[in-house]
Each structure stands twice: as structure tokens, then as C-alpha cells.
Amino acid sequence: MLNSSIIYKEEHNKNTVLFSDYSNEEDNINFNSTWKQVKKTSVNSCQTDPIKYIDKAIQSLKLKDAEVQVDIKEQTLKQFMELNEQQRIRLENFLQSVEGYISKVLLKNIKDESFKGYEVNWDENVVENVCKHILNNPMKYDDMVCTSMDWNSSGTIIASSYGSYKHENWCKHQGYINLWSLSQKNFDPNKPTYTLEVPSCIMSIQWHPILPSYLVGGLFNGDIVIWNINNQLDDTIVLKSIQSEYTHQEPVASLSWISSSFTDMTSRNNQYNILSIGNDGKILVWEIQNSFIYPKLMSNLYMNYIPRTIREVNISIKKGIPLGATDISYSCERNDELIITTEPGYVMKCNLRRFVHLPKPLIEKDVFSNDPSNIIIQQPSENIQTINPSDFHYIRHFGPIHNVECSPFHRSLFLTCGSDGTVHLHSFLQATPLIVIEPPVKYSPTVVKWLNSRPSVFAIGSDNGNIYFYDLQKSSFIPVNVIEASTKPIMSIAFNNNMVHSIPYMASVDQDNIVKIWRLNSYLSTPHHRVKDENNNLIMKSTDWKTELKYLNNILKDKYNE
């Protein structure tokens, strides 16, 4: 039975037909799928640009420093100074032989008057004021003007800040500071070397008096920022103030670096604090050592601090009405004596010793901020009462005062430029002005500055685009020199530090934000005084600034006695 089944399977397998039994492709039958789609394929090719390889080699220089010192041995020095008897006799004979001739020549030179009255002037004699550079900015700032301008301590970088005076509400402008480095090889007058940006209009800037890379600026929102332009790889902002109850709540009108020795007797003379005033009437002293978190000293200006004799109004004024400040300056010898000008035109002398020390606030981290530098300042609950910081008042201007400038040479002189069209020359010790300068033509002064090279010369910028120079030794009413700087009003002028350059340079900027660098002539840059010659004629004689300052004091003696 088993054998029959095996035989049946073998016969069945022989009769079975498979697809693989047919190798001829023409007889093959294909069945297309009713649900699967046929994929279309194609073969393409692409080619990329060949990769270029360049090999270059450079060679660095190896520098080595070496020091060589030559010591003079004591034995060699004694051998050189000691003469034997024969050498001594030869030297005496030589001196006796030439003594008569040398004495004759010396006597002749004493009586000779060939170079009488001649003074050597090693500087180049510049006759005219020359415009050296015109600095244009390719970016146009809409509705923004130059609010401040200043040279750094080395006299090589000029900075100009830009902001707007037309604000109806919160400031939404972007503030800019343009920096031109005149000493760089790639200096381009049509492009600033650096541009600093802040999210608010910049109202005032000033360089550090010693460090040429540190710049401080006051913003429209009341903040104060310090930049270090050497930090090009990192953020240039070094410190920034934090808003609190005792900081500025309105625009910062003016800034100034002040020696910390006048606010802290234990500090060093080379350390500086920052003095700021605002349109809210606050006067603050900031200490950099506390990271600019809170001001150290504070005072306020109120309308009731102004005497009635100065106000010229007999009506009583309520206490606590702030008096907006416009500018600040301090004496060249006493940094604690400040001259402050205000929006109504009042001028007053204040003293830092009348300022109030602020208590240290409670500082906490802001837990809702991801930035670890954000902190919250909680001022103490005690009410801080300030006193009147002014101890002397001067005759006012009739209108806002543009700026005030203390003399860099004379400890008791300062200039004020008002919107009433006059410039006042004041003394610290006299309420009435020594000299009132009114324009010789129909123009209105916009800014006044002392020259750093001449104690008796100052410059006045006007709304007709001219800059007028006055010399108190020659005339206090007629300008001695005029520069036609622009056809638009002059917004600011600044003089660089003449300790670096033998001939001072002046920078001016007009309403179109065009900055010009001027090289002043020798008359404005060289100190001199007026003397009489043998024929009783007045002549100008060159001298140093100390001698000129003495002659200026003699001229002002009659003014003090009036």
C-alpha cells in the first residue's frame, strides 16, 4: 500500500507544469496589477563647480628686546680727571693764550644790539583759520539734531550726540553717538569710525578727563550710560544707571566728571565721580565704585529757593515746585563750587557740601527676568529732606540759558549764553555781570566756549552760522576774528586739548548735523599781551598763558570795583 502511493506522487509530479519550465520570454504572460500604480523613474545627472584650493605662506617676524648698560669704573674716572704736572702746565698755557681773544668777543656780544626785541617762535605762523575736515554722516537722522559735542582727553577723537527736542510724549527715537578718530590711518570723513546706539535720545555727553576711551552720556528717559570704546569685541556699555525714586525722572540736561576728593576725603585724586542735572531739578552725584546702581549725593532745585530780588516778582511761590536745570560747570580750582543755569534764566552758585548723602537701598534680584543683571532697588521708607544747595545768585537772563562755561584758567570767571540774545561775563563774587556782550549785528548767540590756549579769548556761536571770537585784552564788545562756519545755526562748538597739539583745533556743528574741524590761526592759539614800545605804540608781545592771565586780572580790577 505504501509503495503504490509513492508511485502515484512520482507520476503526478511528472505531469505538473510550472512557469519556470518555459524559458522563452515571448511566450511569457504578464498580469498587470489592478491596485498598484506603476512608478515612473528617470536617470539624471548634475555637476557642481570644482573646489578650488589655494596654498599661501606667511612669515612672521621674531622680535627680541635686549638691554645694554655701560658702567664707568671708578679707576677710569680718576685717571681721566687727574692730570700730571706736565699736562697741567700745558693746559694753563693754552688758557692764558686764548683768554684775551675770548674776553674781547664776549664784550662785543654784550654791546651788540642786532637781535634786540627778537623773540623766537618755534610754531608755524598760521594767518587764517582753515577748515581741515568736513565730517558727513551717510545716515540721515529725521527730526534729530546734535545735542552735544566733545573731544576726548588726547584730542584725537571727536564725539557728537544726536537727539530730538520735539517730544510730545515718551521718547520713541533711537539715540546715536558718532565718533571720528582723526589719527587713524583709515580715517574717512564721510563715515564715522564708531557709532554707538541707545534706545532713547542722547541729550548730553562728556569724555573722561584722563582716560581717552571712556565716555558718559545722559539720555532723555533719565538714564546715564558709560561706554568704553576699546571694547569693540564685547559690549561697549560698561555701566548703566537703574531707575529709582531718587534718580532722574526727566531728561538729563548736562553731565560732568568731578574729582571724588570733593565728595569723599578718603578717595584718591585720580578717581572721578559723575555729576548730573536734569529738567526735573535734581542734582545727583554718581559713584562709579558702586556699579552705578544708586546715586551717592542728591539735591533739588525749587522755585522758592530763588530770592525775590532775583525773581523780580513779589508774589509768593508754593514750596516744592521743581526748577528745571539746563547746564552746569565748576571752577577750575574748586570743583565743589558749581554754577548752575535754569530754564527760566536764573543763575546760581551751589556747593557740594550742601548735598544730602543718600542711604544705601535694598537690592534684590528680579526673579521674573532671565537676565541675572536685572535687579530691583527698594529705597528706604524714610523721607529724605534736602536743603537749598545755592549760596549765591546772579542777575538772570530773560529766557532759557543755553550753556554756562567756567574759565579753565581763572578761578572766578564764567560765561553764560542766554536765549535773550546776550552773553554775560560773571565773577563768582559779584551778582551783576562784569560785561554784557550784545551782538554787533542782528544775530542771537547759541553757545559760548573758552579757548584752552588763551585765558582772555572766548568764542560765541550764533544762529546765522558764524563763530565770533572776543579778546578781553583788546575789546569786550567788538570781535577780533569771525569764522563763517555755516549758513545754518551753530548748535555746538568744542576745542581740543592743546597739551597734545601745539596748535589747537576747533570743532563746530550746525543744524544740518555737519561737523567741521578748524585749525585756528596763530593769534587765537598763541598767548600774548599788549605792551608799549619806545615810541608809545601798543604792540602784541608773545608770552605764556600765566603771564597773560596776570594782565587779564589787571584789566578786570576796575570791573570788580564798580
Image (tube, grey):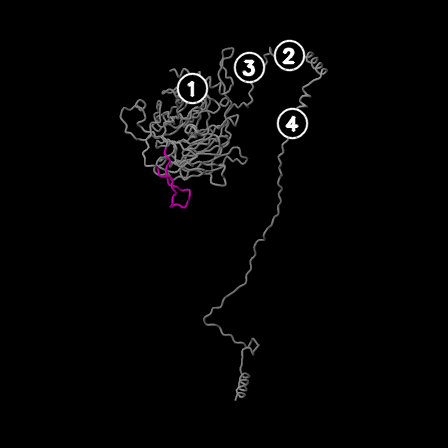
Q: CA distance from mark 3 to mark 4?
A: 46 Å
Verify CB contact (< 8 Å) between mark 2 and mark 1. no
| Residue corresponding to mark 1 | 476
Residue 21: % across, % down = 56, 79
Residue 52: % across, % down = 59, 50
Q: Residue furthest bottom?
A: 1
Relative to the observer, which residue lies in front, 442 or 204?
A: 204
Residue 530: % across, % down = 48, 16
Q: Quick one: label 1, few (<14), some, or many (20+) residues within 10 Å?
A: some
Q: Nearer the viewer, mark 3 or mark 4?
A: 4
Residue 226: % across, % down = 44, 36
The answer to whether any part of residue 13 appears in the image is yes
Q: CA distance from mark 3 to mark 2?
A: 21 Å
- Quadrant hosting residue 312: top left
| Left or right placement of residue 419 versus residue 9 in this view | left
| Residue corresponding to mark 2 | 105
Using the image, determine if residue 368 lies above or below residue 204: below
Secondary structure at numbered mark 2: helix
Residue at horizontal 46 percent and vertical 27 percent from the top: 484
| Residue corresponding to mark 4 | 71
Using the image, determine if residue 338 lies above or below residue 553: below
Q: Residue furthest left?
A: 315
Secondary structure at numbered mark 1: loop
| Residue corresponding to mark 3 | 117
Q: Amino acid at mark 2?
A: Val
Q: Amino acid at mark 3?
A: Gly
